[in-house]
Image (tube, rainbow, N blue to C red):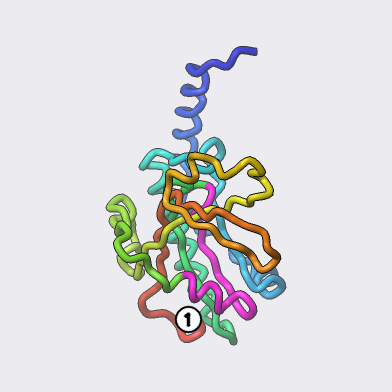
């Protein structure tokens, strides 16, 4: 069957209208799952936009980011009574917005790592884009900018690293098991945390 670009565009527009009509209600926080795995993430599911490197239209990104912001503030209330420290953050990623943007909370074994990752800004990185700065609640958070990187395994590239990866900012990393990776920066991530939080949220 021949692929029709026209039908693809029509389908994309219908999906855009459907997604834009969704209400940005906060997602639930399953405390039992958090207690078991020490981390829980709420990621976006945006249908046709849920692919690496595919950036949804601005209106969809704003509604999705509003959902994540509302989720963060709702989880913050639920976590106030937690008897142990936790790290609560929101990640907005470009260009992998739909695939990688999330709200995450971590405790215990995952706490130190997520604290470290969310507190290491990149010098010279772009600030939070204006379309997110204007969203309700965004100004209540402290935002840092981090490079968004993907790891390419040498096992998957026996004939050498792909040209597209070598044309972007990159470096190699040798793991302790001697496997080699090419770490490629494909974009940026903006990590938001509440400037002043309940004592349990660090």
Residue at 64% in and 78% down: 109
Q: Secondary structure at mark 1?
A: loop
- Which residue is farthest top? 2
Which quarter of the rendered picture does the N terminus lie within? top right
Residue 102: within the magenta? Answer: yes
Residue 189 to residue 54: above or below: below
Q: Position of residue 167 (x, y in %)?
A: 43, 43
> Closest to the observer: 176 or 109?
176
Residue 56 to residue 177: above or below: above
Residue 129: within the magenta? Answer: no
Q: Position of residue 155 (x, y in %)?
A: 68, 49
Q: Residues within 10 Å of mark 1 (few under 14, many from 20)?
A: some
Residue at 49% in and 67% down: 74
Q: Which image quadrant for residue 48?
A: top right
Q: Is residue 158 left or right of residue 77?
A: right
> Closest to the observer: 193 or 155?
155
Q: Is residue 24 left or right of residue 129?
A: right
Residue 26 to residue 16: above or below: below
Q: Is residue 9 left or right of residue 34?
A: left
> Closest to the observer: 26 or 107?
107
Residue at 65% in and 73% down: 38
Q: Position of residue 63 (x, y in %)?
A: 41, 48
Residue 101 to residue 78: above or below: above
Q: Which image quadrant for residue 157?
A: top right
Q: Position of residue 182 (x, y in %)?
A: 55, 53
Q: Which residues are magenta?
A: 99-117
> Closest to the observer: 78 or 90?
90
Q: In this figure, what is the number of numbered marks?
A: 1
Which secondary structure dominates the residues rendered in magenta? helix
Q: Which residue is mark 1?
A: 202
């Amino acid at each position: 069957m021949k692929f029709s670009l026209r039908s693809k565009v029509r389908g994309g527009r219908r999906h855009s209208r459907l997604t834009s009509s969704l209400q940005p209600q906060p997602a639930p926080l399953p405390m039992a799952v958090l207690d078991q795995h020490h981390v829980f993430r709420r990621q976006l599911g945006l249908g046709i936009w849920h692919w690496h490197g595919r950036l949804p239209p601005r209106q969809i990104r704003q509604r999705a980011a509003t959902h994540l912001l509302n989720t963060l503030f709702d989880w913050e209330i639920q976590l106030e009574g937690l008897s142990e420290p936790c790290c609560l953050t929101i990640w907005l990623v470009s260009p992998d917005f739909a695939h990688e943007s999330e709200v995450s909370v971590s405790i215990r074994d995952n706490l130190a790592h997520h604290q470290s990752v969310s507190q290491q800004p990149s010098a010279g990185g772009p600030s939070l884009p204006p379309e997110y700065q204007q969203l309700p609640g965004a100004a209540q958070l402290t935002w840092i900018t981090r490079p968004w990187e993907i790891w390419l395994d040498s096992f998957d590239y026996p004939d050498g690293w792909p040209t597209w990866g070598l044309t972007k900012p990159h470096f190699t990393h040798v793991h302790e098991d001697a496997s080699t990776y090419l770490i490629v920066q494909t974009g940026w991530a903006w990590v938001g945390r509440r400037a002043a939080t309940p004592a349990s949220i660090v």
